[in-house]
Amino acid sequence: MKQNLVVGALLGTFLLSFISILPPLSRAQAQDTGRRATFTGPCAVLTQANPRSDACDAEILANPMPDLERAVEYDEERDGEAHPRSIYLPQEPLPYPIAWQKRPWYYSDAPGIRPADDEWTSDRLIGKYAMYYIYNAVEAEDGMWYLIGPGQWMKDEYVSVLQIPERPEEVSGPWVALDLQNQTLVALVDDTPIYATLMSAGYRLDTLEGNFQVYARTRSMRMEGPPGANPPEYSFVTEWVMFFNEHEALHSADFHNYFGINRTHGCVNLAPGDAEWVWDFFSQTADEWHPSGSRSFFVDEPELAPWVVVYSSEAYPQLPSW
């Protein structure tokens, strides 16, 4: 766990170097157009009928995704079945959206077209939690498809795309954004994103959208299945618990490794290492809103507590523009 994350973010300790022939629009430029920046360049003109070009292949080869720094490494004793997938984000925007492969699957040669019967080979298989750039997105009859490599298209149901939302006006300081569309969590300080990971939010018993503040937290507690849950009964001890909307909380889950897929009863599951990271991230300002610490389950000053923004991003991914 890195210390002094807020200071580090503002000083740019997470700055990465990369080469790009197609720099993204700045935040100001994107706002001038009345929207967030979208894809440009040779790959942006590809379609279902024209899914590949030499110019796009050259663009992709000139812009490989850099090795992003892992924020939390797997620890078997702490994490159990869960594997943290968190990364630190660079200070400057990357030229393309980044994504995780949330389910292993085979890439296609064109949007909306599955591989032929003799093409379901290991060469086409993209492994679970592989990371890559999204160079373009094309909507076909069966949904959105993403260009992830030269002539490689992946259906959206297998992908979690990292999107960075605009900060709500009332939000400041350390906060997290939970994207229900992609099942991702981003930690930010004001307008600066510094960390991102995969999560699992509500399935059937939905996690509600809105802007909330942490109102209670505890190092560990026992959770039991609510009425109407499926399965109807469960009981387990979880850690790093941060309640933000009635019975909805961020907390650890060491009993599964399906992050990027919604599967809970309304809470937000994180790998234990990631849940601890978010707890520590919020704790940097806890003297202002929870000075009583472990002596009190409910925070002392909820109006000063960190924000948890729950939303659904657009289906069509936007270029990073923080």
Image (cartoon, rainbow, N blue to C red):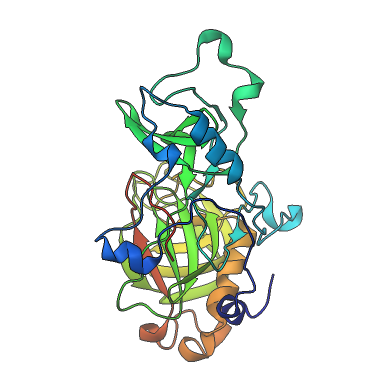
Residue 160 appears in view: yes
Residue 295 appears in view: no
Could you tell me residue 217's position as x and y percent?
49, 74
Looking at the rendering, in which quadrant would you find the N terminus?
bottom right
Residue 62 shown left or right of residue 233 in the figure: right
Number of labels in the image equals 0
Furthest residue to the top? Answer: 118
Looking at the rendering, in which quadrant would you find the C terminus?
bottom left
Could you tell me residue 59's position as x and y percent?
53, 41
Residue found at x 42% / y 62%: 321
Could you tell me residue 207's position as x and y percent?
35, 55
Residue found at x 71% / y 57%: 73
Q: Nearer the viewer, residue 86 or 246?
A: 86
Furthest residue to the left? Answer: 34
Residue 14 shown left or right of residue 112 in the figure: right
Does 261 sit above or below residue 92?
above
Residue found at x 52% / y 85%: 285
Residue 236 shown left or right of residue 212 in the figure: right
Q: Nearer the viewer, residue 84 or 314?
A: 314
Could you tell me residue 116's position as x and y percent?
50, 11
Q: Quadrant of residue 137?
A: top left
